[in-house]
Image (cartoon, rainbow, N blue to C red):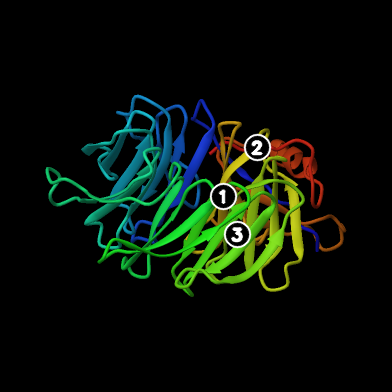
């Protein structure tokens, strides 16, 4: 039975969305934070896209955002030469960490006691959040601005990417263990703790490496330049998005392209699977976030699968349980989508 992908659109940002991250699963569900060039990172309920709050305080574009595992703290990296740590429950700013240049990336340790930052000054910094007045530890070695920095191997090691290099560092000795060089710009990096997998995108390539040894595992080629990719928690699927406004879904094991569809009205800058793997989020130059079902037709979050009458022969349509959306609008949304690619993205605002 053919099913049609009906995304939830999360509005609110006024400029391109450049980064997003999910929390872990908490007793209150899971959460989603978005970084935007409007300087106003937003927190949302992860499974519905419902807006919870906006973190106000940066004076420039926000390039990176993250939540700690239990969604009690948020961190943001910005063009105002600061990283900020926030109380994700109250929205209060907890600390501002001054840098010497634009900050691009932030990441908490699993215990939320340390924050890793990286940016245009080519230095990795480790802040002890229990001693905010202490100077951070600094790791030098990158030769261009740092785009992404992540804790890995239970916070014993650090992965960082600059323009054309990915480096692995030992936390205890603060020294480089190994590096990977690419012949074109690295656009994104994702770390999967289960199985220690590193997902790297550059040009049209989506490459998987061991996060421990940096040895290659496999790679896929997409039809267009890819800006971001994410691996499903169960390692069944891979999603990617980039310059052609489309989202691509692949079978991780076979490499087969399973779906592709126009996801946004501008290039896609970031994609991430939710921690339960039921959906993935995409952020775009068009200023929106969109949530997509991993398996279309499941009843989950605001999606409610309505099976057709047995004798009608209609296609099954996933419907969205949203109070302001009329039945007629839902019919219109479902009919706008072709089975794989559609020309205009339906606007279902969350």
Counting from the top left corner in percent of width and height, residue 254 is at 73, 72
Nearer to us: label 2 or label 3: 2
Which is more toward the observer, 292 or 212?
212
Residue identifier under label 1 = 186
Q: Quadrant of residue 132?
A: top left
Q: CA distance from mark 2 to mark 3?
A: 29 Å
Residue neighbourhood size for the residue with mark 1, other residues' Cα within 10 Å, grouped as few (<14), some (14–19), many (≥20) = many
Q: Residue at x 69, y 58 (%)?
A: 249
Counting from the top left corner in percent of width and height, residue 296 is at 68, 58
Residue identifier under label 2 = 267
Counting from the top left corner in percent of width and height, residue 27 is at 33, 61
- Mark positioned earlier in the residue sequence (2 or 3): 2
Residue neighbourhood size for the residue with mark 2, other residues' Cα within 10 Å, grouped as few (<14), some (14–19), many (≥20) = many
- Where disc 1 sits, the SS reads strand
Q: What numbered label is drawn on residue 41?
A: none
Q: Quadrant of the N terminus?
A: bottom right
Q: Residue at x 50, y 68 (%)?
A: 214
Q: CA distance from mark 1 to mark 3?
A: 37 Å
Residue neighbourhood size for the residue with mark 3, other residues' Cα within 10 Å, grouped as few (<14), some (14–19), many (≥20) = some
Q: What numbered label is drawn on residue 299?
A: 3
Which is more toward the observer, 331 or 156?
156
- Where disc 2 sits, the SS reads loop
């Amino acid at each position: 039975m053919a099913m049609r992908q009906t995304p939830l659109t999360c509005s609110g940002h006024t400029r391109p969305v450049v980064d997003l991250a999910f929390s872990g699963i908490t007793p209150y569900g899971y959460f989603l934070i978005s970084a935007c060039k409007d300087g106003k990172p937003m927190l949302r309920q992860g499974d519905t896209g419902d807006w919870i709050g906006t973190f106000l305080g940066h004076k420039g574009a926000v390039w990176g955002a993250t939540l700690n595992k239990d969604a009690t703290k948020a961190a943001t990296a910005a063009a105002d030469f600061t990283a900020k740590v926030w109380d994700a429950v109250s929205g209060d700013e907890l600390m501002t960490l001054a840098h010497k240049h634009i900050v691009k990336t932030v990441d908490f340790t699993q215990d939320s006691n340390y924050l890793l930052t990286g940016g245009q000054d080519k230095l990795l910094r480790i802040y002890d959040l229990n001693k905010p007045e202490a100077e951070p530890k600094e790791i030098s070695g990158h030769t261009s601005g740092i785009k992404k920095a992540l804790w890995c191997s239970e916070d014993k090691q650090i992965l960082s990417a600059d323009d054309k290099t990915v480096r692995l560092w030992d936390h205890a000795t603060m020294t480089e263990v190994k590096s990977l060089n690419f012949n074109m710009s690295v656009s994104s990096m994702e770390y999967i703790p289960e199985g220690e997998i590193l997902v790297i995108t550059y040009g049209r390539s989506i490459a998987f490496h061991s996060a421990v040894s940096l040895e290659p595992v496999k790679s896929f080629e997409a039809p267009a330049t890819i800006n971001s990719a994410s691996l499903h928690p169960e390692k069944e699927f891979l999603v990617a998005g980039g310059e052609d406004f489309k989202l691509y879904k692949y079978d991780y094991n076979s490499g087969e392209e399973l779906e592709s569809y126009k996801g946004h009205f501008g290039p896609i800058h970031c994609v991430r699977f939710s921690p339960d793997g039921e959906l993935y989020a995409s952020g775009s130059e068009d200023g929106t976030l969109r949530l997509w079902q991993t398996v279309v037709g499941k009843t989950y979050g605001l999606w409610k699968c309505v099976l057709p009458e047995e004798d009608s022969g209609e296609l099954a349509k996933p419907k969205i349980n949203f109070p302001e959306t009329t039945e007629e609008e839902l019919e219109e949304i479902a009919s706008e989508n072709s089975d794989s690619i559609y020309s205009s993205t339906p606007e279902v605002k969350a």
